[in-house]
Amino acid sequence: MSQVVRFATAGARIPSSSKRFASTTTAAAAMGGGNLKMIAVSGSLRKGSFNSGLVRAAREIVKESFEDVELEHVDISQLPFLNTDLEQDGQFPGVVEDFRAKVLGADAVLFASPEYNYSITAPLKNALDWASRNPNAWAGKPAAIVSAGGGFGGGRAQYHLRQVGVFLDLHFINKPELFVAAFQAPPKFDSDGNLVDPDTRTRLKALLLALRQWTLKLKEC
């Protein structure tokens, strides 16, 4: 996994002697800089995933249009299934520690997930659960959701993720919403899952702008 980003979340309170707290906050505090550090999490592990394609497009847009924002795609494919037996001596498995540090160090989170059976995907739920283990790394984070798929374009997954986010203390933007009907004309993605539809790209940029503004507003509180 790539370099850990900065900032510890407010309100995550456990004893300072805890190894778990110390390892996570030390890693998150290692970075500096004045830019907003955002991470993107795709709930699809498929190589040609449309939702991962939205993340790639988001990173391109940020690089082209947002001088004060950095957006990193954080891979969740190597996270083990949540099993508290894997927590030893107050420590998480190394790959989980790294992921939690990425979340804790982010100023905001962009989620991308297809809809599976009216809900979010198993890999995404697993990632949400690992990072919510005490101390909850999601708490207080501004967030936004995008999705691509058939029919409603992943809308039910977005609404279920918002429900999960209530308990995790995530602060989602309400508008704009982006549901991409991936199989309707005109073509939205190429055969490799890359976003090719200009209108969807424009809507994605508007969502990213709203997330940036929301993040800055919450940082002032």
Image (tube, rainbow, N blue to C red):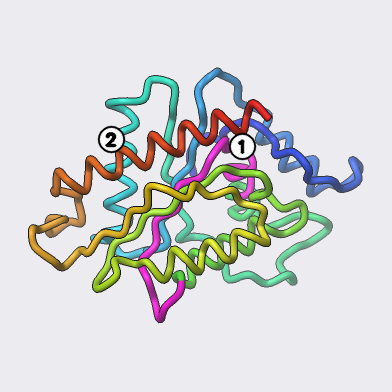
Around disc 2, counting alpha carbons within 10 Å, would you say few (fewer than 14), some (14 to 19), or many (20 or more)?
Answer: some
Question: SS class of the residue under badge 2?
Answer: helix
Residue in view at x 29 percent, y 50 percent:
54
Gap in Å between the C-alphas at discs 2 and 1? 21 Å
- Check disc 2 and give the amino acid type: Glu
Using the rendered image of the protein, determine whether residue 168 is visible from the camera's viewpoint: yes
Residue 5 against residue 179 in the figure, above or below: above
**Residue lying at the far front of the rendered structure:** 175
Place residue 106 in its image quadrant. Answer: top right
What number is the disc on residue 58?
A: none
Residue 3 against residue 140 in the figure, above or below: above
User: What is the magenta range?
Assistant: 100-119
Residue in view at x 80 percent, y 40 percent:
22
Residue in view at x 21 percent, y 48 percent:
200
Q: Give x and y (percent) for residue 123.
A: 48, 67
Place residue 140 in its image quadrant. Answer: top right
Using the rendered image of the protein, determine whether residue 74 is visible from the camera's viewpoint: no
Around disc 1, counting alpha carbons within 10 Å, would you say few (fewer than 14), some (14 to 19), or many (20 or more)?
Answer: many
Q: Which residue is mark 2?
A: 60
Residue 142 against residue 164 in the figure, above or below: above
Quadrant housing the C terminus: top right
Residue in view at x 79 percent, y 49 percent:
20
What number is the disc on residue 105?
A: 1
Whether 26 is among the magenta residues is no
- Check disc 1 and give the amino acid type: Gly
- Looking at the image, is mark 2 or mark 1 earlier in the sequence? 2
